Each structure stands twice: as C-alpha cells, then as structure tokens.
Image (spheres, rainbow, N blue to C red):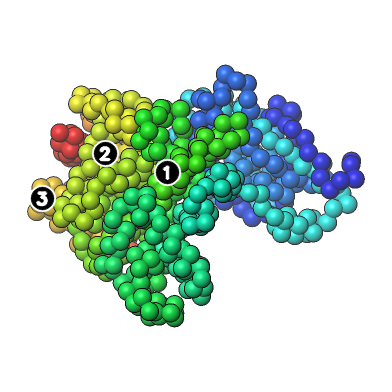
Amino acid sequence: MSNSIIKEYDLSFKNLDNTEFTIPLYQRRYAWGEDEVLQLLNDLKNFYIKEKDLGEKYFIGNIVVEKKSGSYHIIDGQQRFTTLYLIAKLLNENYFNLSYEIREDDKKFLEEFNKDNYKDKQSSLQFKINIETILKFQDEFNKLEDLLKLCQFTITFLPKSIDIVKYFEVMNNRGKQLEKHQILKAKFLSILEYSEDSNKIDWAKIWDYCSNMNVYIEDSIYYGDLKSDEKALNNVRNSFKKLLEENEIPQWLQKQNTTDFISINDIINPQKESQDNLNTYNENFYVRQEYHSILKFQIFLIQILKIYFSQKDKDIKEIVVNDRYLIEYYTNNNELIFDKREAKDFLILLLKMRILYDYFIFKRDEKEQPFLDVFGIEKEVLFLKEDNNKINNLLMLQLLFNFTSPQYFTQDWIAPTLQWIHGKNIFEDNFYENYKNFLENFDKELSRTRLNKKNITDFINSKLTKNNEIDNEVADFNNILNLGTSTPHYWFYKLDYLLWKDYNNEKKVWKDIKILNNIDVKTFKLSRLNSIEHIQPQHPENDCDNWNNEECNIDNFGNLALISNHMNSSLSNQCFKYKIEDIKKQLKRETIESLKILLIYSKYERWNEQNCCYHQEEMIKILKESLK
C-alpha cells in the first residue's frame, strides 16, 4: 500500500466480483428517501438519453473504505452505495455483497430480499419505500439495467495506519469544492469587470442575493449586509437605482410598500431621507422567517437560461434541467457564451425572475408547511393566517404542479409560469384571477399531454417558445386509470384538487354528504404521497364482500386512492368496515391525505361493486369535465 493517506481506483460494477462490503456499527442507518433516489435515477436517465451513444460513464462519486476482517468497511458514501445495491439486487445482479456489522433485521433483509418478497421481510421501512420508488421508476422507464451499467465510481482505501477518528476530522474540516454556480459567477464577473458601469453596479452582490434561495431577496440585502454598514447600504442603493433607471426593471419594484415587511423600494428610497440610524428599520419592519425553496439555485439558473433563450428565439430542446450540465450550457470551450451586453441582460433577467419567484411561487416554512407570498396583500394573508380563496387556490394549483412534476427536483413548470407573470401587470385588479386561469389552463394542457402519452418536456419547451399547439383530443380514461398500483399518480392529485375546489365553490359533489368526523375540507392541502391503496383489498384478511364484476374489479380507479406509505401499512388488508376506524383516527389528528378516500368513507356505509362502479363513473366525469 502506498504511503499516501488514500489510494484511488476507477472501478465499474463488473470489476467488483462479489467483493464484500460492510456498513460498520458506528454508521447511521440508511437514510436516503424517495427524493434522493429519484434524483439519482433521473440523473442516470438523462445521462443515458444524452450520452448513450458516446460510450461515456456516469461518475457516481467516491466511496471511502477501510479493509477489516476480510471485508471493506464503508466509511463515506454508504447512502449512494446502498441505493446502487438495492437497484442491482432488484435486477438480480450480484455485482458485490453488502451487509451490516450490526442490525440483524437489516442485514438479513439485504441478504434475502427480491422484488417479489421485500414487503414481507422485517427491515427498516426506508428500504421498502425506496424499493417501491425504484420499481415504479422501472415501470415507467424499462432500461434500468442499462442505467446501472453506466455507473462508475472510485473507491478510496484507507491504509491500516490511518486513525479513522482523525480522518473524519480532516474530512469534515477541509475546504469545500466550489459549487458550479460559483464557477459561473466568476465567469460572469470576468466579463463584466472592465465594463463601463463596473464601478456603479455591484454585479457580484446581485448574483449572491439571487443565489440565496431560502431568503427573500430584500431581506438578504438588508438583514444580511446592510443594517450595520451605511456605506454598503449606499452602494447597494446606487446599484439598484442604476438598474431601475437604465435597464427597465419593472416599475412594480418601486411600489413594494404595501406591507409591513422591508421592500426593495424601502432600501433604495427610504421614507425618511434624513434617517441616518439604520437600526430604525428594525422598529418599522417585521422580520420574515427563512423559508425552504423548492428549487436549488443551480436548477433555477437552468430554468432562467431557458427563458432567456426563448426570448432570443434560440433552440432550447437540448437543455435538460439537470445541474450536471450547468457549466456546459453556459460555456463553449470553457468560455462564457455571453458577451458583456448579453451577460448584463441575463443578470437583469435573473434578478427580475428571482424577485417574482419570491412572491409568486410557493415555498415551505420551518415546519415544512407550504405557503404563498404575494405583492399587495396584507401580511396576515401572506402567511395564510386568514382564509383567502384566491391565494389558497393559487397555492393548491402550484402544489398540484409540484407533486406531479415528472422530475421532482427540476419542477419544469416554474419557467413557463415565471415567464407568464413577467409579462403581466401584477397590480391589475384581475391579476390573481388571471394567474389562477393561467395555471388551470396550463395544467389542462398537461393533462391532455399525459392522456395522449406525449413528451411532457417537449410540451413545456413549446410553452416557453410559444409554439405549442393545444391537443384537444382526449384519450380513453379507462386505459389510463384502471391499472391498479401502476395507475399514474397525477390523476389522484388532479382529482383531489378538483374535489377541494368543488367543496369551496359549487358543492356539487359534496352536497348533502355528512363528512367523516365533520372535517372541514377547506383545510386540506395536497401533500407528497407515494402509495396506491385498494379500498377493497387485494388479499383480504377478514370477512370482506366477494367481488366478481370484471367491469369494476379491484384494480379499477374507483377502488383506488393515493395515500402515504405509513397509512397504507396501517390500513393493510383490512376490509372497508374495519379500515374506517383507522381513517377516523387519522382525521382526529387533523390530517387528510386523500379527499377521494374521505369522500368514499363519508358517502358509503358499504363498499361493494355497485358503489365502486358508481364512484368511478362520478370521478371520471369530474376529470373529463375539467378538460373541456
């Protein structure tokens, strides 16, 4: 072994040859969730589509191991490596062996599970959730084995002389590699450094404010940099004034004084020009809490690039919203694709879109609850402390897009939405109604795209370039919805939105129905769900009614609901009359997962084939009418 601390090897799966890997006792449990697994799978899928004919490999990353007792103990990288092991095992590929030093249930599970028996094995719930995620992905993209063969990684072996504790200390304290957006920032600044207005506009600050995706941009300016530095305040005022005067930043930026929160206008033009003591701001304004953005800045940069190219009539069909390709999209031969004028134009667009994103795209609070912040609305409504149908409707529509986006981390719908808002006067009386109509029509077009099994990314790109042709043909719903656990999740989310909307407006569906536990449907919010429940169970464990009607069998849409894995496990294979007690317990906690399932258990005392068929017809009619 080399005298160096680590030694690296480039390995692909075929080189591992049943090598034994062990998760040591001091490591935490397997913690990757559905989001991380889908991110990896979608990254591999996009790489496969783009690079499959070039013979390139997808670099997964580095795995750090220590050789011990005839096995390699994984010190760093167990989450990625375990996920790859799950994928390989589901494909019946034995590239390597993976075990736990302790946790006998998990150890036995990894040794024995396959795609047919995993539900019956004792193990961490996270394994089962991620296996279901992998299998669902495989149903939709059946080249999982090809994706796995693309993977390549390095293994770093630690010599016996290395103190593992010291290694962790070094690993945790070493400097972090520059993120891709920081590299891009340097490329932009290198072009703008010698521009004629470089001493008037702080482009670096503008980039930094835009990149802090979990803080409102004006809070980032004021509370982050300015409240104790008047010189900095004056510099930023001058920068933003310059942008307002010369670069056609919309005039609504100067009207942000309708709330009790600090605004860009308050920073640029303070109400008291003689105000020297910046601490006075703290007395006049509320402090917002940091929020959780649904987009990473690197993904946001790619979405804004698509908007920018669309404005310039440039082709965007080759731009996949994947931060792996971020530098590639912005550079040519390692040089920025923009000249000085274009670089400034892009940064101005980035600033505009980032401000619109703050106020018109939902985010999550510290308790992971969704909220929507908007211009011109009183602060109590901003945080949904009061009932406000127009804001709640916008939020519900955005949640519908969020949870049904084909790739959860990319949220492709945001680019066309920001582009639409950018062209509107947000202070018009009918702006919110028009915004809601835009989102509903956008979703209606996406529904038809899904029904006709056309490419959603292609449609979104056509929406940005305004070359989209609306497909008025509606395919047969029965071929889409009656697929049991393979039924696309989108239609459950869409239906729940429509049921919520009906309750708040017409009450055609909910009329004369006594809702279980007297739950107020107005409080319902769409949430992340990933398990399809059969109301009439597939394998009943007690005295259920027998079903023999082939036209309305247990895999039909009427008998299905989308719920969480946890609730699915709770309901198990119970019959209708027993499940209702678990539903009531959940409702006592003021948790509604599915309006479809709430409607069924509120409306029907018995669940037989006749009621199921009627419910199915009623629900499909609602979906069809929403597409007119």
| Residue bearing the label numbered 2 | 443
Residue at left 78%, top 38%? 8
The amino acid on which the numbered mark 3 sits, given as a three-letter code, is Glu
Return the disc, 3 or 1, that comes first in the chain's sequence. Answer: 1
x and y percentages locating residue 249 in the rendered image: 34, 52
Q: Secondary structure at mark 3?
A: loop
Identify the mark nearer the N-term, 1 or 2: 1
Name the quarter where the C terminus is drawn.
top left
Q: Amino acid at mark 1?
A: Asp
The residue singled out by tag 1 in the image is 345
Cα distance in 3D space between marks 3 and 2: 20 Å
**Label 3: which residue?**
506
**Looking at the picture, does residue 323 appear above or below residue 550?**
below
Specify whether residue 539 is in view: no
What is the CA distance from the residue labelled 1 to the residue labelled 2?
A: 31 Å
Identify the amino acid type marked 2: Asp
For the residue pair 59 and 121, the one nearer the viewer reads as 59
Residue depicted at x 48% and y 57%: 200
Q: Mark 1 against mark 2, which lies toward the viewer?
A: 1
Dot 3: few (<14), some (14–19), or many (≥20) neighbours within 10 Å?
few
Return the residue nearer the eye: 139 or 517.
Answer: 139
| 3 vs 2, front mark | 2
Give me the C-alpha separation between circle 3 and circle 1: 46 Å
